[in-house]
Amino acid sequence: MKKKKVRKGRKVLILLLAGLTMIAACGIWYVWKTGIKAEIKIDKERYPVVGIDLSSHNGKIDFNKLRNDSVRFVYLKATEGATFKDSAFERNYKAAVDVEGLAVGAYHFFRFDVNGILQAKNFTAALSEKQMQMPPVIDVEEHGNPDIATDVIVTRLQEMISALETSGIQPIIYTNMDGYRRIYRDNFQDYPLWISRFESPSEDVEWTIWQYSHWGEVDGVSGEVDLNVFGGTYEDFLLWIAQ
């Protein structure tokens, strides 16, 4: 009699857990399907300098409108890997540099499976004769990259940075928390960090730029856009880009 009750209790527990799992799965599907996303609130007094990053995926941009919508800096995708060049980079650069009060920078998407020196050549060629106010960025993230040993990634990234520095370019590094722990923390802390995290960064993470959303909206850009803040006052920002 007791054994039957125990078995019956286990069946109820299993059914209950299955039901909760199904509810959670439906909730995740609903969030994905409807586009509902968590949005962190930024203290604009503490972080008054807002910026965005763009590529050809964002379509045609009205840089005057986004500057009037309190955007102070913009990063444009320039290159990826050894040969890829973003199709909108030249157009976006020419339009952005003409906007007064808008600091412009460029970034390179780092490929784990490509020689670092070749990637540096691709990036420096795109930056040639460009007047950038923001320091160049190397975008280092696992998303969009093959699964490769960490030591190989670190070696190739060191190769790229050394080649850039030989050309007189001092980069900053963009990554998320996975990349921070796996690649940046023990190897590249001498370089300024642009951290992507959709909650407040940990106090032990020293960052210069914080990307807090992939789902922002600003005038001049159709659709969602990445939102970032500089980690200081506007005066700190002007001093930083002057360096």
Image (cartoon, helix red, strand yellow):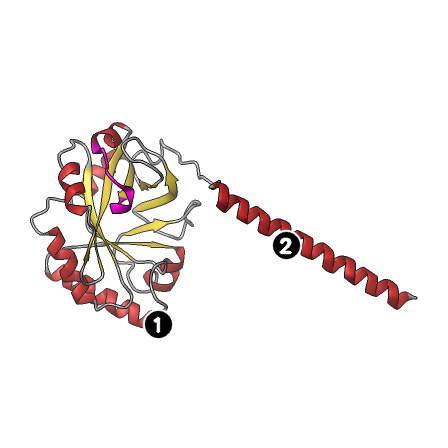
In the rendered image, residue 47, in percent from the top left (x then y), is placed at 34, 36
Q: Is residue 100 above or below residue 110?
A: above
Q: Amino acid at mark 2?
A: Thr
Q: Is residue 55 magenta?
A: yes
Residue at image x 40%, y 48%?
197
Q: Residues within 10 Å of mark 2 (few under 14, many from 20)?
A: few
Q: Residues within 10 Å of mark 1 (few under 14, many from 20)?
A: few
Q: Say which of 89 and 6 sits in front.
A: 89
- Which of 9/43 is in front? 9
CA–CA distance in space, label 2 to label 1? 34 Å
Please determine whether, in this image, residue 158 is positioned above or below residue 36.
below
Q: Amino acid at mark 1?
A: Ala
Magenta includes 38?
Answer: no
Q: Earlier in the sequence, mark 2 or mark 1?
A: 2
**Which residue in the structure is indicated by mark 1?**
149
Task: Residue 11: give x, y in percent of width and height.
Answer: 78, 61
Which image quadrant is residue 243 in?
top left
**Image spot of residue 79 (x, y percent):** 20, 55
Q: Is residue 198 left or right of residue 222?
A: right
Give the residue at the far right of this rendering: 1
Which quadrant holds residue 9?
A: bottom right
Highlighted magenta segment, given as a residue range = 54-63
Which secondary structure, mark 2?
Answer: helix
Residue at numbered disc 2: 21
